[in-house]
Amino acid sequence: MANEYLTVQEALTAVLAGVSVLPAERVPLLAALGRVLAEAVVAQDNLPPFANSSMDGYAMQAADLVAASQNNPVRLRVVADIAAGSLPAVAVTAGTAARIMTGAPLPAGADAVVPVEDTDEVWRGSERPLPATIQIFRLVQPGDYVRHPGEDIKVGQEVLAAGHVLRPQEIGVLASLGVSQVPVIRQPRVGILATGDELVAVEEPLTPGKIRNSNGYAQAAQVLAIGALPVVLGVARDTEADVRAKLQKGLDEGVDLFLSSAGVSVGAYDVVKAVLEAEGNVGFWRVRMRPGKPLAFGHYHGIPYLGLPGNPVSAMVSFERFARAAILKMAGHTMLDRPMRQVTLLETISSDGRESYIRAVVRRDGTAVTTGSQGSHIMTSLVQANALLIVPEGMTEVPTGTQLTAWMFDWPEHVF
Ligand code: AMP
Ligand code: MG
């Protein structure tokens, strides 16, 4: 596929076809946050597991209270005091009631609970001595203030399907069902390689002609931010031997995907290309996309390899469009895009006919403005942006008022 011109969609389709969903593993419950379920979860218990009270109050037989009202309270004899976590020792019969706390098991014989607020129970400071009798000022229907077993989840029910993404609420449900080890898709390990003789490490002094390796960090952060594991391979000098050595380190570390930046354009020192062509089947594409035209994709020693452009903004935007989807697919996700919404552009911009990803601020009212210079080396334009506006292929003039699709990063509180 060398030197072909591809649309963004064609390139994305080819990248996604070249990566597979990783195998499953079992992890402790909390470690499953953000992961994708590998198998359906079937409830082994009812939730709630037993009939219990939804209020602090008195459990009794609703039939005893049919005549109860504010002016005509019904008096019942109190036969038990049931705390949450304890089992009722006696049954409730006609004319009797058991004091019951929220979450405590409903005693045998009772069919409803009346909240303590609707009784004459007297509090002495924080003390609540158990009264011998209780007056109740209202009627209740059978089942009132009772949580029924299986009302939320029934034993045997498929609670979560394979492929479900686990958020805090799913973690809570799994905990309530006693699932302490969760079958999830393994997290992709992504080998991050920066290339170029001009790069120095962040902690090294900047000398003339050098720049700091920002991509290595930006891509590692992008990988972390989507729940995958970066394996930092450092900076390869522009020699075939060094590129090979750094990639070997990735093979030794068992990475699931290589992600490099730079060295995929037509520069004279792009030795990455030479290594990948010699030892892999990696295609060098020109994608009709702005920023981020050059892109390499294929396999190196059998491991998927994605080569991003070197310019920091191009690298990050290409990651957003291609690497993000590939990594999410490997992690078992099926929703591979960011949330998108239609927005109204509040200025006039121009494009060069390639599908363009314009750094912008999308406001809550659905309008959008660009974040200034769109140079592919202007990192601060990404810092200010909360979205990329997608200018479709073929469009060169984009007048103010145009409706565009926004690829949303986030919605920070200071953006209204
Ligand atoms: P190249 O693809 O090697 O021609 O690089 C394109 C541009 O991206 C050049 O200006 C490089 O200096 C810059 N660049 C390449 N790699 C990095 C990196 N890791 N961090 C920051 N800038 C980079
Ligand atoms: Mg270079």
Image (cartoon, rainbow, N blue to C red):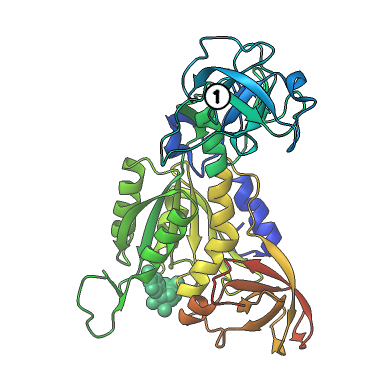
Residue 169 found in image quarter = top right
Is 78 rendered above or below residue 240? above
Classify residue 255 by image quadrant: top left
Seen in the image, is 351 located left or right of residue 104?
Answer: right
Residue at 64% in and 56% down = 337
Where is residue 397? Give x, y as percent. 76, 87
Residue 295 visible in rendering: no
Which residue is located at x 59 percent, y 30 percent? 57
Placement of the N terminus among the 4 image quadrants:
bottom right
Circle 1 crowding by C-alpha within 10 Å: few under 14, some 14–19, many from 20:
many
Residue 51 in the image, given as x and y percentages of width and height: 62, 20
Find ligand 1 in the image and state its quadrant: bottom left
Task: Give the x, y percent position of residue 190.
Answer: 42, 49
Q: Which residue is mark 1?
A: 99
Please tell me whether residue 393 is drawn above or below residue 254 in the rendered image: below
Question: 103 above or below 231?
Answer: above
User: Which quadrant: the C terminus?
Assistant: bottom right
> Outermost residue, left direction?
205
Nearer to us in this view, 216 or 114: 114
Q: Residue at x 62, y 38 (%)?
A: 164
Between residue 263 and residue 124, name the one nearer to us.
124
Q: Ligand 1 closer than 8 Å to the CB at disc 1?
A: no
Horizontal side of residue 65 vs 202, given as left or right: right
Q: Amino acid at mark 1?
A: Arg
Query: Which residue is at 37% across, 64% downward?
Result: 217
Q: Where is residue 36? Give x, y as percent.
A: 56, 39
